[in-house]
Image: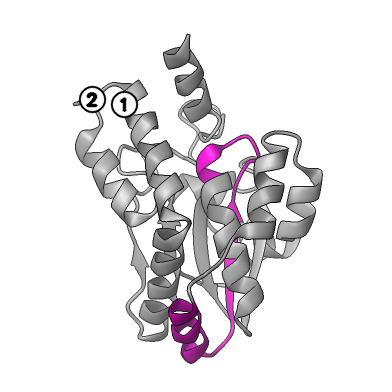
Amino acid sequence: MLAALLIASLATCQPVVSRGLVLPVAAADSSLQSMFDRGTSFAMFVESATARREGWRRLQREAVVDSSLLRRARAVGGTWQLLVIARDGCGDSMNSVPYAARLADSVAGLSLRIVSPTEGEAAANTHRTADGRMATPTFILLNASGADVGCVVELPAPLRQWTNASRGAVSDDSLHRYRSTFYTKDHGESISRELVEGLEAARAGRPRCDRQLAR
């Protein structure tokens, strides 16, 4: 039963889409900038959450970004937009998005909007995990013109690297136990650092995005 629950929890982080469907990236009505403009604020997302509601509300109150990372992010300057594809029932979303929102709230020139997997399907399709899945959360960094200049897909770097190396070698139960322990100890530090490093890389003209393109 526990294993089944854990597998079900993972599934909630993966958008349900039609098999074989490959959507255009820059269709006029589904560009990244248009998605961002139609997105919701973090506060509104949490207010409307029906799954994991208490966890979202707790992290909305308690999420903290290290002051050294805030200084680095503020030093980047410019105007940036963080498009987030997330769902309230996804534990990976709940453990990462609040820290991204705190970062955006704390840095002038950085704004954040959230869209659902359905609304963000075209973008998720071109920002897949290493094993080819569309998953939540997906963070896409846009510059002032709405161009894609970086991303983080599903997991922060240390957890992503471990998961990619371990998938198929350990059970789903073990994968979920490790994720849970990681998030408990990490307190959003890894996702915050990776997003700040993404800002710095974008500013330097070297976008960072560990993703697989549409299959």
Name the residue at 48% across, 73% down: 66
Asked if residue 132 is positioned above or below residue 70 in the image, the reply reads above
Instruction: From the image, tell me which residue sits under label 2.
Output: 170
Q: Amino acid at mark 2?
A: Val
Q: Is residue 161 left or right of residue 204?
A: left
Please report the bounds of the magenta region as a residue range. Answer: 67-93
Q: Residue at the far top: name it.
A: 1
Name the residue at 58% across, 46% down: 94
* Image marks 2 and 1: residues in contact by CB distance under 8 Å: yes
Q: Position of residue 165 (x, y in %)?
A: 20, 40
Say few, some or many: other residues with alpha carbon within 10 Å of mark 2 (under 14 / 14 to 19 / 20 or more): few
Asked if residue 54 is positioned above or below residue 28 in the image, the reply reads above
User: Between 105 and 113, which is closer to the camera in this rendering?
Assistant: 105
* Quarter of the figure that contains the C terminus: top left
Say few, some or many: other residues with alpha carbon within 10 Å of mark 1 (under 14 / 14 to 19 / 20 or more): some
Asked if residue 144 is positioned above or below residue 32 in the image, the reply reads below
Q: Position of residue 193 (x, y in %)?
A: 40, 68
Instruction: From the image, tell me which residue sits under label 1.
Output: 174
Q: Position of residue 110 (x, y in %)?
A: 60, 77
Which element is circle 2 on? loop
Q: Is residue 21 left or right of residue 63?
A: left
Q: Position of residue 130 (x, y in %)?
A: 30, 43
Query: How many numbered circles are shown?
Result: 2
User: Between 70 and 148, which is closer to the camera in this rendering?
Assistant: 70
User: Between 208 and 91, which is closer to the camera in this rendering?
Assistant: 91
Real-space Cα separation, disc 2 to disc 1, in angstroms: 6 Å
Residue 40 appears in the figure:
no
- Residue 78 part of the magenta segment: yes
Which element is circle 1 on? helix
